[in-house]
Structure formats: C-alpha cells, structure tokens
Image (spheres, coloured by chain):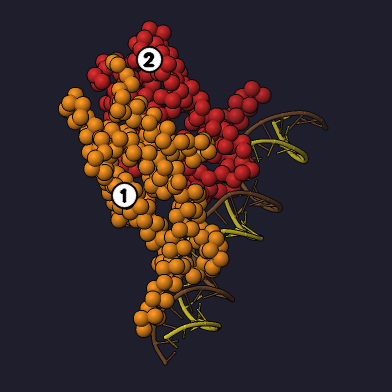
Chain colours: A red, B orange, C yellow, D brown
Amino acid sequence: MEATSDRQIGALRDTRQQILDVARYLFSDCSYLGVSMKDISQRLGITKAALYYHFSSKRDIYVTVLDEVLVDLRAGLCTERLDEPAEEQLRRMVKDYMEFGMRERNLVNALMLKLSPAETELRQFVVSSREQLIELFRPAIEGVFALRRSRPGVDGRLLATMLVAMMDGLVLEHSYFKKALDPDAVSGQIVSVLGLDAAPSVSA
Amino acid sequence: MEATSDRQIGALRDTRQQILDVARYLFSDCSYLGVSMKDISQRLGITKAALYYHFSSKRDIYVTVLDEVLVDLRAGLCTERLDEPAEEQLRRMVKDYMEFGMRERNLVNALMLKLSPAETELRQFVVSSREQLIELFRPAIEGVFALRRSRPGVDGRLLATMLVAMMDGLVLEHSYFKKALDPDAVSGQIVSVLGLDAAPSVSA
DNA sequence: TCCAACTTACTTACCGGTCGGTAAGTATTC
DNA sequence: GAATACTTACCGACCGGTAAGTAAGTTGGA
C-alpha cells in the first residue's frame, strides 16, 4: 500500500507539476491570453485533453501558477539574516526581487489581465499578493530610516509602493528590450536613487 | 468637386477616427489580445468587415493607435515654458505623464505584447518611443541638478529611466486596483522620493 | 496464484463558439 | 458609371472544453 501510494502520488505530481512549470514559463513569456491550452500540451508532448485530467480549466492552471509564483517569491525574499544591517537587507531584497522579476513576469503580467467583474477571487488574490509584497519591503525601508534617525515621519509604505513600482517598470523594460541588466548593479542604483543606500549619494 | 471632396474626406475621417478612438480605448483597457475586431465593430455599431475598408488588419489599427498615442504624449509633455524653473518643469512633466498614464495604458501594454521575431517594425517603434520618452525627461532632470551645482556627474539618463519605470509601475497599480490617485499629489511624491524636488526633503 | 473489477492517466473525436480576414453585393452620392 | 462606405455571407483556423474510449497498473477475493 505504501509503495503503491508513493507511485501514484509521484506520477501525478510529475505530470501535474510539469504542466505548471510549462504553463508558468509560457504565461510569463507570452501572457495568459497569448498562451493556449494547445501550446501547453504540445510543449509537454501530451494532448490538450490530458491537461483536463489534472486541472479543471485554463483558469485553474493560471491561478495555481500564480499561487506558486507568490510562494516562491516570498520564500526568496523572507530569508532574514539576524546580523544583517538594514541597508544591506534592503539591497539584498531589491536584488532578489529584480533577479526574480527578470526570470519571469507573471506577477507584472497579472496586473495587465482584464478580469470580469465576477472574478472577485482572482482579483482579490492579485490585490493581496501585491499588498504582501509591499509589506515585505516596508519594514526593510523603515529599518534603514530608523538607523538614520532622520525623518522619523517618512512614509515607509509610500516608499515601498514606489520602490516596487520602479522595480516592476524596470523588469518590464528589461524583458522587452532584452537589456542586459546586472541585478547586483541595478539594485545598487535603485536604492541609491531612492536615497536608501548605505553611503548617501546626494547631499541636498 | 470641392464639396464632394470635403464630404468624402470628412466622412472617411469620421468613421476611421472613430475606429481608432474605440480601438485605443479598448486596447488600453483590455490589451491588444483581449480585444477582437468584433468588439471594436460592435462598439461602433458597424460590421467587422467595415473595419477592413479603413484598415488593412488588426495590426494596422494597433500600430496606428500607438502612433497616435505617442504623438499625443509628446504634445502634452513638450510644452516648454521659458520662464519655468527646472524643478517646476520636471514636476509638471511628471504630473502630465501620470495623468496621461492614468487615462490609458497603451504604452505600458505595448511592453507586454509578445511579438514574433519578424515584427521588427513594431518592436522598433516601441523601442524608439521608449527612448524618446526617456529623452524627454532626461534634460529636465539634468536641469534640476544643474541648478543645484551638486553631483555634476549624476546620470540623468539613469534617473530618467528609473523615473519612467516608477511612473509606469504606478500607472499599472492604479489601473488594476482602482486606487484613487491625485496626479498632483503623486507627482510631488515621486519627485520628492527621487530627490528631485524644489525643497530637499532628505538631509543625508 | 489468478482474475475480474476498479483506478489512473491518458487519447481520440468531437462540440459550439470565436478569431482575423475576404469576396461579392448594396446603397448612396456625384 | 464610378467611387465611397459600408453589409452579408463566408472561409479556414483556432479556442476552451467534453464524452467516450484505451492501456496499464492495482487490489481483493476465490
């Protein structure tokens, strides 16, 4: 019973996960609307109908992909290091996010997909994931300013919002123009431009 | 012949321009792939085939729309005022761009559309329009820093790139989350965050 | 051990609808 | 009659999704 169970679960995960992997890549590259179920199935060498054994609809695949994307992103950004200076933490997070965004565009793409009014669940998911993202960066930003003891009234949330917006915009540019972007260099530039770097670069 | 010519040109412009207006709105709202020729024609109360009298293809409509968008944007941003202080000029341009972006998303959307390798013309158009946009903001940014006589080596182009990226990111958020954004307030926040405002807000 | 029944993971063939686009036809104007 | 601005009817291809069928594996009872 044990061996059987393993085999079944293993096989199921194998194809199902492969579907998600391929869909994740294609949705990122060509957007949700630009990818058909046939595209996904062909890439896997299975039939379109086989996708429906594992998922109830194209939307089901999409929502599962987005779930996965968010889990991965959170995992990548939440690795707190207790002895890490605030500026370094922020810089690392920015770098991690840029690396992530340069590998795939599903989170940015999700903002572009026009949903029908009835699709409140997916909309709420995107809204929530966005909020979570901003909330990940906000304390890091506020940590930087706490160290500075300047501008205690700085709006960490506003800065986080703008930081995320900037990164998304840069991710968009990168993916379209195929610009070579070094995540390490660009993350330094980003925090510098926002005045969030370790060595202040602007004497106002 | 004169009256005929006027009537003909007038009628042609009327329907043709209406097609562009509707397409522009729908492409902005639902993206290129999310809009069908039937959507456009229905909205106008004409048949789909009538669209092909005026335009050779869906792509033709799209390219013409993007042309129009860029012309409008340039017109809106290029109104130089000779007695305008540099900071004010930049702030105004940011505000104008945010207002523009909040009304329509076609320029950002264009970055999301996956083009086939053969579509070099459209790709080049988007690349060029992006460059033009950044070049519009760069001198304004550099004007601000020239006044400050500080950091003469500041990379105006980098700042312009990041500024545009941030604005696009914010436009994306706004359109998805239906956040109420006051262009005047948010433009002030943007230039402030980037250290480009008239009253330095950070003493480093 | 064998086998029928069941389960799993697909495939084949099909569905209704939509997509961009086309050719012939039509009504109006000059 | 010619030109313009459409409409009607159609095309092949594609879309997401479904029902029936198939092959392989598993299991429990004889």
Q: Chain of mark 1?
A: B
Q: Chain of mark 2?
A: A
B29 and B114: which is toward the camera: B29
Alpha carbon separation for disc pair 2 and 1: 37 Å
Residue in the picture at 38% in, 47% down: B107
Mark sitting on residue B74:
1
Name the spot of residue B61 as percent of width and height, x first: 41, 60
Q: Secondary structure at mark 2?
A: loop
Give the left or right position of residue B152, taking residue A145 as reference. left
**Does the image show residue B74?**
yes
Amino acid type of the residue tagged 2 in the rendering: Arg
Residue farthest along the top direction in this orientation: A83
B41 and B11: which is toward the camera: B11
- The answer to which image quadrant residue B64 occupies is bottom left
Residue in the picture at 30% in, 28% down: B198
Name the spot of residue C15 as percent of width and height, x first: 66, 60
Name the spot of residue B172 as percent of width and height, x first: 45, 39
**Relative to A108, does residue C27 appear above or below in the rendering?**
below
Residue in the picture at 63% in, 26% down: A5
- The answer to which image quadrant residue A154 occupies is top left
Label 1 crowding class (10 Å Cα cut-off): few <14, some 14-19, many 20+?
some
Give the left or right position of residue A67, taking residue B59 as reference. right
Mark sitting on residue A151:
2
Name the spot of residue A89 as percent of width and height, x first: 37, 16
Label 2 crowding class (10 Å Cα cut-off): few <14, some 14-19, many 20+?
few
Give the left or right position of residue A40, taking residue A163 as reference. right
Q: Secondary structure at mark 1?
A: helix
**Relative to B128, does residue A157 appear above or below in the rendering?**
above
Residue farthest along the front direction in this orientation: B83
A97 and C3: which is toward the camera: A97
Please state, as top left, top right, bottom left or bottom right, where the C terminus of chain A lies in the image.
top left
